[in-house]
């Protein structure tokens, strides 16, 4: 089965152990990108520059990553020349990699418009892999209405949503990464998504 990048949202902290167990049991090669969780929320509440807040929030992702590793999947801290398509399961510590590539043209902006959602999309694009985002919602809402699919076409209007960071959908519009968003509070849905079966959620496709 094709490897996958998985974003495990910080809001799923109470369910982390059961989610990691489902991922482990699937045996699907993956790179898990941790959310920022409560640590990022604390940083967001401070009066900080975008530069400081950006890197502090990424370090908060690493803290959550270390917590997730206690559930049995090891961490991985790649350098800019060592990011590889996963052949097994690892939890990404992204700080070192993102610091090293920060001067490149495709580096992500330093802004609260960019959170772990867009960071996970960045890594999925770099690895040419599909992205599975685990959140605490059933589907993404556009204009207050839940949708099961968002399709990007050339010159199409990019919708807005409060369920992903502001950078995500325009960024996804420019890429060809298949994205599936699933409620991680339901182990059966996570299991189905990892098995590439139909599941309640939202798909984002070009």
Image (cartoon, rainbow, N blue to C red):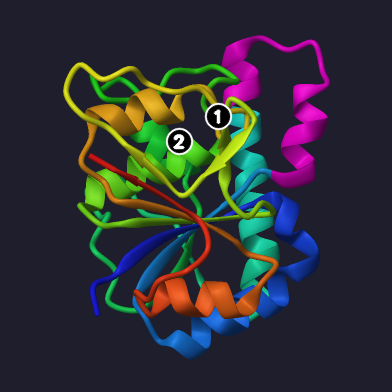
Q: In percent of the image, x 36 and y 23: which residue is there?
A: 170
The spot of residue 54 in percent (x, y) is: 58, 24
Of residues 36 and 18, which is closer to you in this image? Answer: 18
4 versus 53 height, above or below: below
Label 1 Cα crowd, 10 Å radius (few <14 / some 14-19 / many 20+)? some
* Residue 101 placement, left or right of 147: left
65 versus 1 height, above or below: above
Task: Of the two numbered discs 2 and 1 on the same chain, state the one appearing first in sequence.
Answer: 2
Of residues 23 and 146, which is closer to you in this image? Answer: 146
Q: In percent of the image, x 63 and y 74: which residue is there?
A: 19
The spot of residue 68 in percent (x, y) is: 65, 67
* Residue 154 placement, left or right of 163: left
| Secondary structure type for disc 2 | helix
Q: In percent of the image, x 72 and y 59: which residue is there?
A: 12
The spot of residue 171 in percent (x, y) is: 34, 27
Marks 1 and 2: in contact by CB < 8 Å?
yes
Residue under pointer 2: 118
| Residue at the farthest front position | 145
Q: Which residues are magenta?
A: 37-54
42 versus 200 height, above or below: above
Quarter occupied by the N terminus: bottom left
Residue under pointer 1: 165
């Amino acid at each position: 089965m094709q490897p996958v990048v998985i974003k495990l949202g910080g809001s799923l902290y109470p369910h982390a152990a059961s989610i990691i167990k489902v991922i482990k049991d699937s045996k699907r090669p993956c790179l898990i990108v941790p959310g920022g969780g409560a640590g990022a929320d604390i940083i967001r509440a401070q009066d900080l520059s975008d530069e400081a807040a950006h890197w502090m929030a990424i370090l908060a992702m690493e803290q959550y990553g270390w917590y997730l590793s206690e559930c049995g999947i090891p961490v991985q801290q790649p350098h800019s020349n060592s990011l590889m398509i996963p052949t097994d399961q690892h939890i990404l510590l992204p700080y070192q990699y993102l610091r090293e590539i920060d001067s490149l043209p495709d580096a992500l902006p330093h802004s609260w418009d960019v959170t772990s959602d867009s960071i996970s999309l960045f890594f999925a694009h770099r690895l040419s892999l599909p992205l599975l985002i685990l959140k605490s919602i059933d589907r993404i809402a556009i204009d207050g209405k839940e949708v099961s699919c968002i399709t990007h076409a050339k010159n199409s209007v990019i919708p807005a949503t409060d369920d992903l960071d502001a950078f995500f959908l325009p960024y996804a519009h420019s890429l060809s990464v298949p994205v599936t968003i699933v409620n991680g509070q339901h182990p059966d849905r996570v299991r189905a998504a990892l098995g590439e079966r139909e599941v309640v959620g939202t798909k984002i496709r070009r």
